[in-house]
Amino acid sequence: MSNAADWSGVKQQRGLWAVIDEAVTHASGHRPSMLQDVLARRLTEIGVLNGGIVQRGREAGIPVPLNQAVTALVNGLEQSWAP
């Protein structure tokens, strides 16, 4: 892989593996906001994030089974917190 990778028209000055290595090294202790919401039993933004992909996929006739599954699982988890 060259130093300047081209990912969907976005020029990167470093290769993919350098970017992944940096992310793993510097962000390994980071807790994403959705994880923080789940741990605090708050509603997440799953409907906007993955649910949005599911909706766009339906509109375009493109199957997105992994996003459908993630959305359904997180929605089910949220529903399990209801009193």
Image: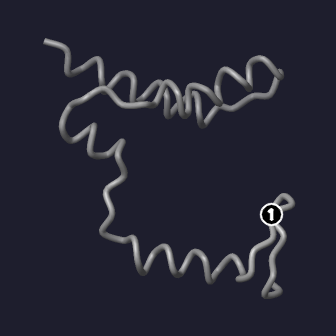
Quadrant position of residue 79? top left
Percent position (x, y) of residue 41? Answer: 20, 31
- Give the residue drawn at x 81%, y 84%: 1
Give the residue displayed 31% in from the left and 46% down from the top.
35
Badge count: 1
Left or right of 25: which side holds 50?
right
Residue lying farthest bottom? 3
User: In this view of the protein, which residue sits in the foreground, 77 or 8?
Assistant: 8
Q: Give whichever of 5, 11 is nearer the camera.
A: 11
Question: Where 3 sits versus 62, above or below?
Answer: below
- Check disc 1 and report its element: helix, strand or loop: strand
11 w.r.t. 71: above or below: below
Residue in the image at 27% along x and 37% along y: 38
54 relative to 59 in the view: left or right: left
User: Relative to 71, does residue 20 appear above or below in the rendering?
Assistant: below
Q: Position of residue 56 (x, y in %)?
A: 72, 24
Name the quadrant containing residue 65. Answer: top right
Q: Amino acid at mark 1?
A: Val
Asked which colour scheme the image uses, the reply is one colour
Task: Give coordinates of residue 30: x percent, y percent.
Answer: 33, 63
Residue beneath the point at 30% across and 24% down: 78
In the rendered structure, the answer to whether residue 80 lies left or right of residue 4 reads left
Label 1, on which residue?
A: 10
